[in-house]
Image (cartoon, rainbow, N blue to C red):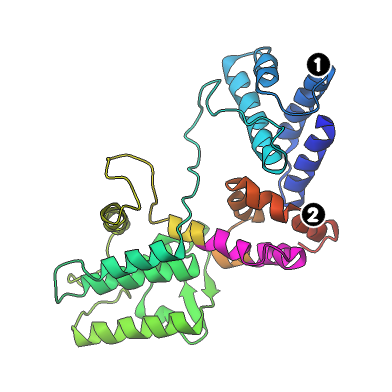
């Protein structure tokens, strides 16, 4: 029954630290309405009929968006649940864009292309090559990587001193990543690229976040990974972080116990204030969400998260 599906969906969010009170009330109202009409699966027409009874256009939009997310969740496991289109009752604030997951081969192509950037003989091509490589290998925020100082690179990992929400943390890195950072340091010394920032341009300062993003987008366009049309959707620099998070979850996809514990560890590693923020990566990829949902339920049921 739809009411059972709603209960399961709400429980999953609550186990991840979200109260989900308003969404729960809204979804159960929808389930009762649909079941009264004989529905056992999500039906687009029924959602529209129900939302049309809302007290205001804004309330109709909120209700529709809540049920649409439920529909995406259920459709991933059973295609008999219809997937409602976005924006049928208007759009509120700009939604968080869905991640573009980059394949390993695409990331390697981007790193190689960065080395062909100009000016030739300068530190800039190496800076973007190793910056993009670090983001892909660690899932760091762009701002965190650009804020690194030479003294933040240690044998135990990277010291993130200016993380989001003012938090600092030690970020362990793989031995291959440490080796790559050592290579970049040697290149800086050879080219006499001085400066207090770890990633520097010829000016001795780190590139701005805007410039780093622009360079990444241009490379992605040149490689055909992103459309040439301006303002068209496609991979952004931040998608290296998204790709790291999702691929790391996929790596233990078939081991529910491992996935459950990995979610908690990944949340800490990425510097998220709440595991609910990590859970967004699953919400953005419903098939993956369903594949590991049972693992999260198992972990949180035992009260170990």
User: Are there few (<14), some (14-19), or many (20+) residues within 10 Å of tag 1?
Assistant: few
Q: How many marks?
A: 2
Q: Residue at x 79, y 26 (%)?
A: 31
Point out the image quarter for the N terminus. top right
Q: 81 or 272: which is nearer to us?
A: 81
Question: Is residue 161 visible to the viewer in this orientation of the structure?
Answer: no
Q: Is residue 303 left or right of residue 45?
A: right
According to the picture, the residue beneath numbered tag 2 turns out to be 297
**Residue 124: quadrant of the picture:** bottom left
Main SS, magenta region, reads helix
- Which residues are the magenta region? 244-265
Name the residue: 52% across, 84% down: 156
Residue 65 on image: x %, y %? 61, 29
Image location of residue 226, percent across then percent down: 34, 49
For the residues labelled 1 and 2, the Cα–Cα distance comes to: 31 Å
Q: Secondary structure at mark 2?
A: helix
Mark 2 crowdedness (10 Å alpha carbons): few <14, some 14-19, many ≥20: many
| Residue corresponding to mark 1 | 37
Disc 1 to disc 2: CB gap under 8 Å? no
Q: Which mark is residue 145?
A: none
Residue shown at 74% from the left, 42% from the top: 19
């Amino acid at each position: 029954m739809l009411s059972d599906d709603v209960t399961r969906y709400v429980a999953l969010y609550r186990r991840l630290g979200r109260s989900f009170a308003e969404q729960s009330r809204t979804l159960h109202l929808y389930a009762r309405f649909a079941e009264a009409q004989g529905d056992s699966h999500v039906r687009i027409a029924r959602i529209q009929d129900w939302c049309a009874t809302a007290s205001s256009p804004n309330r109709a939009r909120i209700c529709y968006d809540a049920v649409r997310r439920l529909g995406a969740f259920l459709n991933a496991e059973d295609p008999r649940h219809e997937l409602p289109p976005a924006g049928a009752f208007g759009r509120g604030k700009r939604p968080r864009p869905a991640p573009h997951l980059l394949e390993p081969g695409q990331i390697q192509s981007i790193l190689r292309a960065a080395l062909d950037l100009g000016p030739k003989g300068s530190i800039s091509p190496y800076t973007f090559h190793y910056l993009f490589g670090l983001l892909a290998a660690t899932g760091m925020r762009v701002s965190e990587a650009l804020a690194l100082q030479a003294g933040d690179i240690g044998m135990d990992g990277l010291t993130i001193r200016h993380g989001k929400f003012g938090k600092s943390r030690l970020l362990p890195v793989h031995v291959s990543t440490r080796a790559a950072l050592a290579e970049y340091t040697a290149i800086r010394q050879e080219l006499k690229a001085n400066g207090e920032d770890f990633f520097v341009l010829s000016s001795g300062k780190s590139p701005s976040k805007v410039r780093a993003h622009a360079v990444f987008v241009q490379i992605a366009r040149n490689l055909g990974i992103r459309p040439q049309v301006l303002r068209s959707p496609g991979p952004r620099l931040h998608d290296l972080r998204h790709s790291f998070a999702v691929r790391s979850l996929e790596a233990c996809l078939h081991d529910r116990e491992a996935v459950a514990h990995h979610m908690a560890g990944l949340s800490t590693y990425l510097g998220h204030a709440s595991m609910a923020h990590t859970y967004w990566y699953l919400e953005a990829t419903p098939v993956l969400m369903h594949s590991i949902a049972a693992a999260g339920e198992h972990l949180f049921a035992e009260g170990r998260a």
